[in-house]
Image: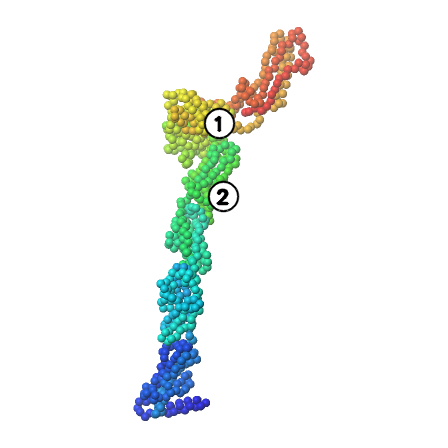
Amino acid sequence: MEHTLFSLLLLLSTHIYSGHSDDDDGPAKAVLTKQPKSSQIFSGESVTLRCNIQRGEVTDWKYTWRKDGVDFLSRKHEYEISEVKTSDSGDYRCLGTHVDQKKHSKWSDIVRLTVTALPKATLNITPNPAYTGETVTLTCSVGSDSGWSYKWYKGNAKKVVTLSGRHSTTGATFTISRATESDQGLYWCQGEIQSRSISSIISDPVTITVKERPAAVLTLQPNWPQIFSGETVTLRCDIQGGEEIDYAFYNSGMSVSTKTEPEYRISPAKNGLYTCEGLQKRNGLKHSQTSNVIQLTVLDQPQAVLSVSPQWLNPGDSVTLSCGFKESSTGWRIFWYRTVPYTAGLLSLSDRSYSVEPLSGKGTSEDSYTLIPAGSSHTGGYVCRAGRGDPVYDTLYSKPQFLWSGEPQPSVSLKMRPNRTQHFTSKSLSLSCEEKRNSTGWKLKRYREKAVESGCDSNWGSIAGSTCTIRSTCKKDSGVYWCESGSGEYSNAVNITVAVGPLILESPAYPITEGDSVTLRCTNRYQETNPNPKVDFYKDGVLIRNETTGEMTIPAVSKSDEGFYKCTFNEEESPKSWVRVRGVTPGPSTSVPVGVVVGLVVAGVLLTILLVLLCRYKNAKDSCCNRTFSLPQPQSTNQQDHESTQGRAPDPGYTHLQHDAGAAAAGPSDVMYAQIQLKELDKKNKKMPADPKENPVYSEVKTGKTTA
């Protein structure tokens, strides 16, 4: 109350004094200053307010201080606050009163004191965790005042960090170069203003972790040993602890993709040396080690390679198609096709020589396909190709491989003159497609040097009707020849060899039936000078016979005689040719039933009795019945005349049934016939026996199977 009254009286006296003056200059001016001058004062600092009166000495005045409208007196012209608090914040003014003259100065301008709490330092570390070899940056922040400098501490003891060649400070940053595990630990920072002897509150500790970068493992999917042009592959980058990272892919060190997913799809595949690594999303810094290198070498689109075994049909046998590749590759699914005449709109070979139709609806994981049983219906061309991956990548079709038959076919047959498998060069050779039933569109084709040639053009020879004539044979004319219709039917096929040497082996161009006779001839190009050479014959590379006639005959061939034959003379050698032997096709049994034989015997007996009665009837005096009879022998059927052309084989499809009365015993169970003799009757006793049983004559009959 007293203080308030005092203030009121002071204001009144000041007002009265200021209303008049004894001099002309007027009242003095009070000037209030603050130290430190910074607009931001932190609690705990020492602040001094100083009031200066522009007249007289400092001691001439008494001072009145006002804070936020509240006054208090002081003899000092300075008002010092040793440790300011936020409550000391406010608007300050001062006024001077002259000690002797009782004069008052003017009030000073307001000086605002703002006291803020001491700030706390904030420490940021990037990157953290850090990887060995990386640069780690520590940043300390204490408000926006630029007057701060910083101190750095490490460890629980808060020791000041010792600077070294790898550690440096610049302003608010502390840098650790080429971080190692020794740089791990707790870190603090603190700001200070040395001119005012104040420090910020120390920051919270931050732990730096330094570790080895995680490994990046790059894999190729699918992981095939070869990648082909047009295929799609995927690179996958696996990194341990890969949260919040990007995956970067490189080709020969150049970035090709950065993405959040660990997979990089390459379609189509491209050559290169591929690597990957992880990058931290928040700063783009390297997260992982660089991965292993995958070298991607893209090869040309592969072509399937088909083989057929056996390539020549044996009726009833199975045939295996095998599909492979020149390159070592995996993951394929094989698709099998049969060739058909080219048709627009169907799957076709690149050269349009054939269209193809699937042998089965789905591909197979196996690289072989079996045709069971192999018959004439399987004659023709076959191809394969393979596919793999997603999307499916297909190889090129294989070149067509053929399954041939030397057997005659129902539609057409291939005939040639001369009719043999081997021919000399510079000779004439004619081939013709002879139709057996109403069919059209037949073409002569040949397969040589792993390629199919169609028709008889100028490169072959000349065409006249259905006959193709090669005027002058040469080695390149060697190959397999057949006739093929526009509907995909095939004739028999013939493997022709054109020899450049002086010898050829004349062998049948068609299969030989078991039991037939066959003659192989060794023909010399200059045979006129040596008509009867002594030659050696070989089968499957083994010497089997020496002949001085130049030919070798097998009277009755068997399946064991099938094989490769050649002949030699004076160190000259013919090409080899395959001689095929077909088994006898089982047909209706040719064995004579016992009942038939017995019937014939009974008929013979009755015939004899009839003749006896006839003789008695005529009462002939001469002996008319002392004769020998035999049952008529069956005649040979289905015989085929051998062609006059030298060395020509029997026409396929027919069987030679050779029957010779003198050689009847050659069969294991031939029918044996007995003679029936009728003895001359006694002229004196012309009475016939009442019962033929009294004097019977029997014939012995052996029955059994006969061979056709």
Give the image location of residue 60, x and y in percent.
34, 89
Q: Image quadrant of residue 246?
A: bottom left
Give the image location of residue 525, x and y in percent.
38, 24
Label 2 near label 1: C-beta < 8 Å? no
Q: Measured along the vertical axis of the image, is residue 443 above or below residue 704?
A: below
Amino acid type of the residue tagged 1 in the rendering: Asp
Residue 706 visible in the picture? yes
Residue occupying image coordinates x 36% and y 67%: 170
> Is residue 531 or residue 510 the one in the foreground?
531
Count of numbered badges drawn on the protein: 2
Q: Measured along the vertical axis of the image, is residue 254 above or below residue 415?
A: below
Label 1: which secondary element: helix
Quadrant of the image for the C terminus? top right
Between marks 1 and 2, how big is the CA–CA gap?
A: 39 Å
Amino acid type of the residue tagged 2 in the rendering: Ser
Location of mark 2 (residue)? 365
Give the image location of residue 112, x and y in percent.
39, 80
Which label number is shown at residue 358? none
> Is residue 209 or residue 87 the one in the foreground?
209
Location of mark 1 (residue)? 561
Q: Measured along the vertical axis of the image, is residue 64 above or below residue 122?
A: below
Neighbor class of circle 1 (other Cα within 10 Å; few <14, some 14-19, many 20+) is: some
| N-terminal label among 1 and 2 | 2
Q: Image quadrant of residue 145?
A: bottom left
